[in-house]
Amino acid sequence: MLVSELKPKEEILGYLREGERIFLVSCGGCADVCEAGGEKALSSLRTVLQDAGHPCVGETVIPFLCNKVLVGLRLSRLQQKVESADAVLVASCGVGVQAVAAVLEKPVFPASNTITYGAFQGVWPSEERCARCGDCVLAYTGGICPLTACPKGLLHGPCGGSYQGECEVERGRPCAWQRIYDRLEALGRLDLFLRYKPPKDRQKERDVPLSRRKSLFWALEYVEGE
Ligand code: SF4
Ligand code: SF4
């Protein structure tokens, strides 16, 4: 289980351009259990959007957003509404936000921060991973987590070893920051890449601090083990 909590509304609204139409997605699994997902999150986000002049063109609760196949199936049934949105706002853990971003060619923004494992570690069916950093940056990275997709967990761009789009840690693997740049360019949102982001507040890491964990390369290790 991944425990998440909704971000402050000011931060969520900060991602959005004036008047953008939003499709809301909420997780009916872990996020619902910790009251940062399900119908409750939809209701509170709907109010935030309406008060700020953002039309909500549709919404859905999907049980276990971490299941990318399920996410793709459910969203395909709502294709017209999703396509009419300028962006998608997701109330779930970081895995769920990444899963939605992976199946849509649209800006996907996190409404939540993932703060801890809770009591036990889940088994997620796809390669998306979340390191529970407590301050989700997926809004600025095209829905690709730099903390888990980059073995060094770099937050502000590629290291000097990124070469022709490949990671220096293992040639043949795509550099996470190349992926992030390509994704934002394809979405026409390179402005998000260029935004100033203050240093990360490590006090928000409530689990074992990232700096003390053995490896952040788990997403790739998982794919390798498939
Ligand atoms: S930035 Fe990555 S590690 Fe942090 S909450 Fe988002 S998905 Fe999880
Ligand atoms: S090459 Fe890219 S993915 Fe690899 S460590 Fe450097 S920034 Fe991270």
Image (cartoon, rainbow, N blue to C red):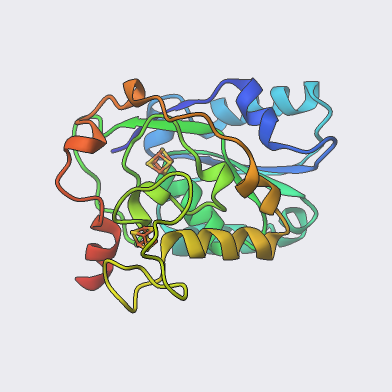
Of residue 134 and residue 99, the one placed in the foreground of this image is 134
Q: Residue at x 76, y 53 (%)?
A: 81
The correct choice, above or below, for 69 with respect to 164 in the image is above
Tell me which corner region of the image, top left, top right, bottom left or bottom right, holds residue 58: top right
Which residue is depicted at the point 63% across and 22% down? Answer: 9
Ligand 2 falls in quadrant: bottom left
Where in the figure is residue 38, as x and y percent of width and height? Answer: 51, 33
- Residue at x-position 79% and y-position 26%: 50
In this rendering, the count of numbered labels is 0
Please provide percent x and percent y for residue 76. Answer: 63, 64
Q: Is residue 78 above or below residue 197?
A: below
* Residue 208 position in % (x across, y down): 19, 31
Q: Is residue 226 visible?
A: no
Residue at image location 23% in from the left, 29% down from the top: 207
Q: Looking at the picture, how far across and down is residue 84, in whole percent? A: 80, 54
Looking at the image, residue 113 sits to the left or right of residue 111; the answer is: left
